[in-house]
Image (spheres, rainbow, N blue to C red):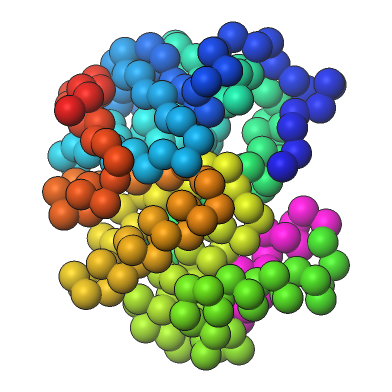
């Protein structure tokens, strides 16, 4: 994994035991407060379910932890370094290397084949096409969707598309995978399959997973649960 360079490395503040930690996070969008004094720490290899009702602030918490949005107050530390002190370019580089993302609707690029979608993060990191597609094909095989490699996303089922999206999230070998309602658009059978594969792949690679959900059956796959209620975090 690529560590922050000396030119962009922020001040070290968080204890080295926590892989990713958000402390005292607050975020408002205009007059609406999304987070208010929310905190969450994640260890390497841990799968944490972040639960809460719609509008509770759980997705905003994920976006702050991933460096997608800056909290108004509070701090986010990754591997002991202040994430919010990185430049926009530094946070973008971190999301391409150390962080993987899995969304509710996959968000695959429709003009690319499934193989090209999975290889895309590697290509953005500078890897040449052939080795990138070789790694992508290996992940498609691991997640049991090799038959979709040459197809475009519109031609595959929802469950297959979400497994392709999972392969894209994992192909760079991320330290943290952020999964925002990854089974929300799937039926229960495909949802269970995606969750089992995600947990197995994360365990095998040693990646931590932040799993945002409002469903208890999804949260049951996690090592522990954190509830977001009215912008605050409550550990179960």
Q: Quadrant of residue 232?
A: top left
Asked if residue 123 lies in the magenta stretch, the reply is: yes
Q: Quadrant of residue 82?
A: top right
What type of secondary structure mainly makes up the magenta span? helix
Judge by depth and name the residue closer to the eye, 57 or 209.
Answer: 209
Question: Above or below — where is 57 with respect to 187?
Answer: above
Question: Above or below — where is 175 with respect to 13?
Answer: below
Give the residue at the far front of this rendering.
Answer: 204
Q: What segment is highlighted magenta in the picture?
A: 111-126
- Horizontal arrangement in the rendering, residue 101 relative to residue 11 (left or right): left
Judge by depth and name the residue closer to the eye, 176 or 126.
Answer: 176
Instruction: Point out residue 45 in the picture as x, y percentages from the top left corner.
Output: 47, 41
Q: Measuring 25% from the left and 31% from the top, which residue is drawn there?
A: 226
Asked if residue 203 lies in the magenta stretch, the reply is: no
Judge by depth and name the residue closer to the eye, 145 or 74.
Answer: 145
| Residue 103 can be seen in this image | no
Instruction: Point out residue 132 in the picture as x, y percentages from the top left corner.
Output: 75, 69
- Horizontal arrangement in the rendering, residue 216 relative to residue 161 (left or right): left
Question: Above or below — where is 75 with respect to 61?
Answer: above
| Residue 143 can be seen in this image | yes
The N terminus appears in which quarter of the rendering?
top right
Instruction: Point out residue 139 in the picture as x, y percentages from the top left corner.
Output: 58, 71
The C terminus appears in which quarter of the rendering?
top left
Q: Quadrant of residue 105?
A: bottom left
Q: Measuring 43% from the left and 85% from the top, which residue is drawn there?
A: 156
Q: Measuring 50% from the left and 35% from the top, which residue is drawn there?
A: 44
Instruction: Point out residue 121 in the picture as x, y percentages from the top left corner.
Output: 67, 59
């Amino acid at each position: 994994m690529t560590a922050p360079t000396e030119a962009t490395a922020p001040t070290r503040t968080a204890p080295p035991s926590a892989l990713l930690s958000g402390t005292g996070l607050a975020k408002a969008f205009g007059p609406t407060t999304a987070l208010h004094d929310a905190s969450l720490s994640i260890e390497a290899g841990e799968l944490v379910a972040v639960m809460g009702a719609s509008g509770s602030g759980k997705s905003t918490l994920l976006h702050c932890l991933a460096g997608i949005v800056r909290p108004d107050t509070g701090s986010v530390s990754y591997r002991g370094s202040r994430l919010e002190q990185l430049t926009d370019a530094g946070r973008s580089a971190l999301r391409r290397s150390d962080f993987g993302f899995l969304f509710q609707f996959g968000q695959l690029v429709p003009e690319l084949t499934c193989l090209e979608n999975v290889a895309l993060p590697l290509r953005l990191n500078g890897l040449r096409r052939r080795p990138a597609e070789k790694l992508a094909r290996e992940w498609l095989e691991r997640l049991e969707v090799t038959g979709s490699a040459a197809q475009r996303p519109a031609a595959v089922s929802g469950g297959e598309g979400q497994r392709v999206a999972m392969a894209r999230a994992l192909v760079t070998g991320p330290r943290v995978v952020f999964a925002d309602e990854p089974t929300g658009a799937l039926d229960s059978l495909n949802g269970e399959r995606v969750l089992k594969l995600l947990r197995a792949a994360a365990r095998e690679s040693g990646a931590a997973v932040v799993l945002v959900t409002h469903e208890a059956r999804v949260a049951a796959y996690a090592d522990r649960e954190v509830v977001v209620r009215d912008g605050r975090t409550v550990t179960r």
